[in-house]
Image: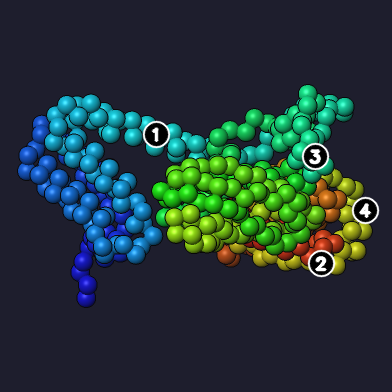
């Protein structure tokens, strides 16, 4: 049997340069923990750092996707060697490595904890925009017309009119940023997706990672679902190591899960070859189009009998409280609970009706029937039934409920 340690196998056999970089930084921090310089351990650490650099630039990893990160690995290992061998560099960077790194990790973990689902707070009604505020329609503007004094920033203006101008933080923006290509590709691309109800704006960052000029570089986008590209990005010419940002606009006509995919096509001016890069898919979430709404019990029963599309989802969760499970489903699906909730949690059965309406006027009905079974270690069992007039919203909402009902483990 193979007794090679897993860490050595990941680095040597599989050529995982990122793990090797992490190992180099960890060894450096361990040596710096000693109160006085330890020459023997320092020599061993430097020897391992040199081996990692040799591995990064060796031909055994030339065919791997991480080959382009060899220069980054060499820079990091060089810095670690300077810290270990140069007393001045050690004194200068030791507090940064040992203390500031912990602080940054603590800040990151705190931000992740704050993003976890919390109890839904009461919504404060505030004035979103004035009735006579200007709304600029980008699709009606010709490219040759100058904007003038009344032409506001179309993205910000549309966001303000639809109620999305809430001063989004950097963390919220990064949650809607999708890498379209890898760091090893000649052109790195990432997209910042902004959803304005009927309109999806893609801001695509393109970075030329080669020393050659790339001509006629264009991003060919396609969609799956009820989405239509109305503004395609223009072809660009990127110089060596240059970057640019292009925009694309997509119209959405119904509430269902959609996908955006495409390729980058360009001509390398050095070799005169036309090349293409396949991009990662962008998955559009149905929750961007769902809004909580209310209706009477009679109207709910009437629509429930009328709608023909039904999706039945079995309940499988680690939550043991009936009201807590209902709150979690309501918060995760952005729906309105039409049923009065019980005062306590003494009952072993709960049934509730949820209602929401999409920005396209489509109705979504959900019935939650859940029971706490004592013979099943107190776990919850039952079904969540979804009905709608169209198949897309019933299936997409069912997939959303299936994914989130397991995600609140405590």
Of pointers 1 and 2, the one earlier in the residue sequence: 1
C-alpha separation, residue under disc 3 versus residue under disc 4: 46 Å
Answer above or below: position of 61 versus 297.
Answer: below
Of pointers 3 and 4, the one earlier in the residue sequence: 3
Position of 281 with respect to 85 (left or right) is right
How crowded is the residue under tag 1: few (<14 C-alpha within 10 Å), some, or many (20+)?
few
Residue occupying the point 32% across, 46% down: 72
Residue occupying the point 35% across, 62% down: 64
Of pointers 2 and 4, the one earlier in the residue sequence: 4
- Whether the residues at callouts 3 and 2 have beta carbons within 8 Å, the answer is no
Q: Is residue 2 visible?
A: yes
C-alpha separation, residue under disc 4 versus residue under disc 1: 54 Å
Q: Farthest residue in the bottom direction?
A: 1
Q: Nearer the viewer, residue 37 or 116?
A: 37
Q: Nearer the viewer, residue 183 or 281?
A: 183
Residue 20, image x, y percentages: 27, 52
Q: Which residue is mark 3?
A: 141
How crowded is the residue under tag 4: few (<14 C-alpha within 10 Å), some, or many (20+)?
few
Answer above or below: position of 12 versus 69.
Answer: below
- Badge 3 element: loop
User: Which is closer to the viewer, label 2 or label 4?
Assistant: 2
Of pointers 4 and 1, the one earlier in the residue sequence: 1
Of pointers 3 and 1, the one earlier in the residue sequence: 1
User: Which is closer to the viewer, label 1 or label 2?
Assistant: 1
How crowded is the residue under tag 3: few (<14 C-alpha within 10 Å), some, or many (20+)?
few
C-alpha separation, residue under disc 3 versus residue under disc 1: 45 Å
Q: Which residue is mark 2?
A: 309
Q: Which residue is mark 1?
A: 104
- Badge 2 element: strand
Q: Which residue is mark 4?
A: 298
């Amino acid at each position: 049997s193979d007794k090679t340690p897993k860490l050595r196998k990941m680095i040597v056999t599989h050529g995982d340069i990122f793990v090797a970089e992490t190992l180099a930084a960890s060894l450096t921090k361990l040596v710096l923990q000693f109160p006085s310089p330890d020459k023997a351990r320092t020599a061993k650490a430097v020897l391992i750092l040199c081996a990692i650099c040799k591995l990064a630039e060796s031909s055994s990893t030339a065919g791997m996707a991480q080959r382009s990160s060899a220069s980054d690995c060499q820079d990091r290992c060089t810095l670690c060697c300077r810290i270990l061998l140069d007393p001045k560099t050690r004194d200068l960077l030791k507090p940064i490595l040992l203390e500031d790194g912990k602080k940054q990790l603590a800040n990151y973990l705190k931000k992740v904890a704050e993003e976890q689902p919390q109890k839904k707070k009461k919504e404060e009604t505030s004035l979103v925009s004035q009735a006579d505020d200007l709304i600029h329609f980008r699709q009606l503007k010709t490219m040759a017309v100058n904007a003038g004094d009344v032409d506001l920033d179309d993205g910000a203006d549309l966001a303000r009119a639809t109620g999305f101008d809430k001063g989004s933080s950097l963390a919220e923006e990064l949650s809607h940023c999708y890498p379209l290509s890898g760091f090893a590709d000649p052109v790195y691309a990432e997209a910042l997706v902004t959803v304005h109800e009927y309109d999806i704006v893609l801001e695509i960052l393109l970075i030329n990672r080669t020393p050659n000029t790339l001509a006629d570089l264009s991003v060919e986008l396609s969609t799956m679902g009820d989405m239509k590209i109305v503004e395609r990005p223009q072809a660009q010419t990127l110089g060596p190591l240059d970057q640019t940002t292009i925009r694309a606009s997509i119209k959405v006509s119904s509430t269902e899960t959609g996908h955006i995919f495409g390729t980058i096509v360009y001509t390398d001016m050095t070799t005169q070859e036309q090349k293409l890069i396949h991009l990662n898919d962008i998955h559009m979430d149905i929750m961007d189009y769902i809004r909580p709404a209310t209706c009477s019990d009679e109207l709910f029963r009437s629509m429930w009998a009328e709608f023909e599309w039904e999706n039945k989802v079995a309940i499988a969760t680690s939550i043991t409280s009936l009201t807590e499970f209902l709150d979690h489903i309501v918060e995760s699906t952005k729906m309105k609970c039409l049923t009065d909730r019980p005062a306590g949690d003494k009952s072993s059965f709960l049934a509730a009706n949820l209602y929401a309406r999409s920005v396209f006027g489509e109705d979504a009905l959900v019935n939650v029937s859940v029971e706490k079974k004592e013979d099943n270690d107190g776990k919850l069992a039952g079904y969540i039934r979804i009905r709608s007039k169209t198949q897309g919203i019933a299936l997409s909402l069912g997939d959303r409920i299936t994914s989130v009902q397991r995600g609140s483990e405590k």
